[in-house]
Amino acid sequence: MFNIRILSQEQIKPIVSIKDAVDAVEDVYRLKAEGKTSVWPLVTYDFEVGVSDMDIKSGYIGGLNIFGMKSVSYFSNNIKVGLPNLIGILTVYNAENGVPLGVMDAGYITCLRTGAAGALGIKYLARKDASRMTMIGAGKQALFQMAAALTVRPDIEKISIYDGLSESNAIEVAENAVKLLKDLNVDASKVQFKAVCNLEKTVGESDIIVTATPSRTPIVMNEWVKAGTHFSCVGSDVSGKQEIDENILPRMKIYVDDVAQCINVGEIETGIKKNVITEENILGEIGEVIIGRKQGRTSEEDITLYDTTGIAIQDLVTAKKVLDIAEEKKIGTIVDI
């Protein structure tokens, strides 16, 4: 009855770039700010806190006439049995008639759009002369965060890499970063990559800090942070996660991807629950900054935070880009159901 395109991760990787994802996510943030999207309530479940969890994100993009959902699970012990830690499926539907358009692996798209989201915080909120970045977390997402950051700010000169769980991971990523980023079509040959173990010193020297960890306790402390620093925090995506000291929050100009979701599961969740800040501290959503409705950074001394928990419309807009390219190139398996 319906022809649905099925796409594997191997089919998706060659046809969509990190720049495609950055452009797509920036476009959907604009649509959200213009009231042309809907983000539906997040569903989450911890099978074992800090070890395994799942979430279901869904929503609607009126500007593209699509809706859909993504289910993603994280099982940290999967690597021991030869399985990926992150597994996800993404389904896209036609919003005019409910007909499914495509089903695809969500893992790679999640990596792309999460990198894109963090980078858009850098593009619109970091100082124009920011050149020193610190990547906290050396897992799979670190590569996509760095790739997207260099896509929007190619003048970044140095990236320090810290991993509190595995110093060897940080060293490996730093040593191989240029080659790995080249595989994502990002030229990082002029960037200095360095694994670091003294995070306090590194934070104090950084213009941009990106956090992408599963932490449930603060990694970056208030007293380490200098004026003018920008933070893009992407690790807090379920309730209870936290990467930065909540006492930094009153010093920050705070922007989010979605107010309701960030209050409940974002980096700002702990600060609000502890009454360190209130919802009034949120100055706006990033889409409002992009379209010029809200001001972002207004001074070189501002400490800015972009709290991105990840919302379904980021996945859907990237998936629509993938489906369009796949249809043009006749990639994927067509299933009649």
Image (cartoon, helix red, strand yellow):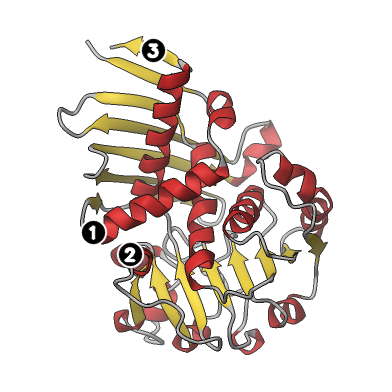
Q: Position of residue 130 (x, y in %)?
A: 64, 74
Quarter of the figure that contains the N terminus: top left
- Distance of mark 2 from mark 1, alpha carbons? 9 Å
Q: Position of residue 187 (x, y in %)?
A: 72, 48
Q: Please, is residue 3 above or below residue 187 in the view?
A: above
In the picture, residue 97 is in which quadrant?
top left
Q: Nearer the viewer, residue 272 or 205?
A: 205
User: Of the residues under marks 3 and 1, which one precedes in the sequence?
Assistant: 1
User: Of the residues under marks 3 and 2, which one precedes in the sequence?
Assistant: 2
Residue type at tag 1 = Glu
Residue 291: which disc? 2
Report whether residue 184 is seen: yes
Residue 34: which disc? 1
- In the visual, does 269 lie left or right of 100? right
Quarter of the figure that contains the C terminus: top left
- In the visual, does 272 lie left or right of 248? left
Q: Which residue is mark 3?
A: 334
